[in-house]
């Protein structure tokens, strides 16, 4: 009886240990770019000073070398995230370059996703192309959901050509296609009926039997007429 109880206790402990090990492993493997980012006083001071010195290239570069490189990883990540939130493109590009040179840096799709979405918001096509070249050079492979988010971001910010370039990259991805990212893209393509028809054909080919709900043909025509009436 005692032996049986001891075995049951051992099994319970093993299961508990395995559960804890899995949780610790998943927590430590979470990308730093997906964690909550809290900026310290030092990080906040550096961010404010960079904004103040931005129009003085010499003092700006001097400050970058002397202070930014000394920031802790968590602060550097938080500063970049804050600059992205404020759409400070020049400062984002500068910190982006610093991050990629840090000894702790590891290629990460969320790092690049956030940069590309920020650049799409600000319609910085050339900068987005350079970032794309960087991620290609590092062998970054976006998953299907991230591809869908990126295509949609560029569409929502009035960059259909660049959005479709990313879509073509998505089509060439070795990942198994998923229907949800395609639906996200199709919704973003409503203002671009010709492009939407192309993606719709791809969707129906990949997911036969699924239904795509099309918007009324006069949806945007009605909006256009309303705008014309207001201008008159």
Image (spheres, rainbow, N blue to C red):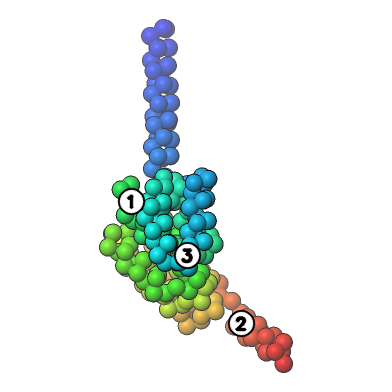
The circle drawn on residue 118 is none
Classify mark 2: helix, strand or loop: helix
Measured as percent of width and height from the top left, residue 202 is found at: 40, 73
Q: Quadrant of residue 213?
A: bottom right
Residue 196, compared with residue 7, is above or below; it is below
Q: Which mark is residue 102?
A: 1
Work out whether residue 114 can be spotted: yes
> Which of 168 and 196 lies nearest the eye of the viewer?
168
Q: Secondary structure at mark 3?
A: loop
Label 2 to label 1: alpha-carbon separation:
48 Å
Left or right of 112? Residue 44 is: right
Labels 3, 1: front one: 3
> Which residue in the protein does label 2 denote?
220
Q: Which mark is residue 54?
A: 3
- Tag 3: Cα neighbours inside 10 Å, few (<14), some, or many (≥20)? some
Label 1: which secondary element: loop
Quarter containing the N terminus: top left
Write down the quadrant of residue 206 in the picture: bottom left
Mark 2 vs 1, N-terminal side: 1
Q: Residue 231, position in %: x, y?
A: 70, 89
Q: Residue at x 69, y 85 (%)?
A: 226
Could you say where residue 144 lies in the image, as x and y percent from the top left? 40, 60
**Of callouts 2 and 3, the N-terminal one:** 3
Q: Where the C terminus falls, by quadrant? A: bottom right
Q: Are marks 2 and 1 in contact (CB under 8 Å)?
A: no
Q: For mark 1, does the 10 Å Cα neighbourhood hold few (<14), some (14 to 19), or many (20 or more) residues?
A: few
Asked if 174 appears above or below 157 in the picture, the reply is: above
Q: Is residue 230 left or right of residue 112?
A: right
């Amino acid at each position: 009886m005692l032996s049986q109880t001891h075995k049951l206790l051992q099994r319970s402990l093993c299961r508990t240990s395995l559960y804890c090990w899995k949780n610790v492993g998943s927590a430590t493997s979470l990308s730093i770019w997906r964690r909550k980012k809290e900026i310290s006083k030092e990080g906040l001071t550096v961010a404010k000073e960079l904004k103040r010195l931005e129009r003085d290239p010499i003092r700006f570069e001097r400050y970058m070398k002397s202070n930014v490189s000394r920031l802790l990883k968590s602060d550097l990540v938080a500063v970049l995230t804050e600059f992205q939130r404020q759409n400070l493109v020049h400062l984002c590009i500068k910190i982006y370059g610093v991050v990629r040179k840090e000894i702790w840096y590891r290629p990460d799709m969320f790092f690049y996703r956030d940069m590309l979405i920020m650049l799409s918001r600000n319609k910085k096509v050339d900068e987005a192309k350079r970032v794309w070249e960087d991620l290609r050079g590092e062998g970054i492979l976006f998953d299907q959901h991230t591809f869908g988010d990126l295509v949609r971001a560029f569409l929502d910010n009035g960059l259909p050509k660049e959005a479709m370039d990313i879509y073509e990259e998505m089509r060439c991805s070795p990942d198994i296609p998923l229907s949800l990212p395609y639906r996200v893209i199709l919704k973003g393509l409503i203002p671009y009926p010709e492009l939407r028809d192309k993606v719709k054909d791809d969707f129906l080919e990949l997911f036969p039997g699924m239904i795509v709900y099309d918007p009324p043909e006069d949806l945007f025509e009605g909006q256009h007429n309303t705008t014309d009436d207001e201008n008159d």
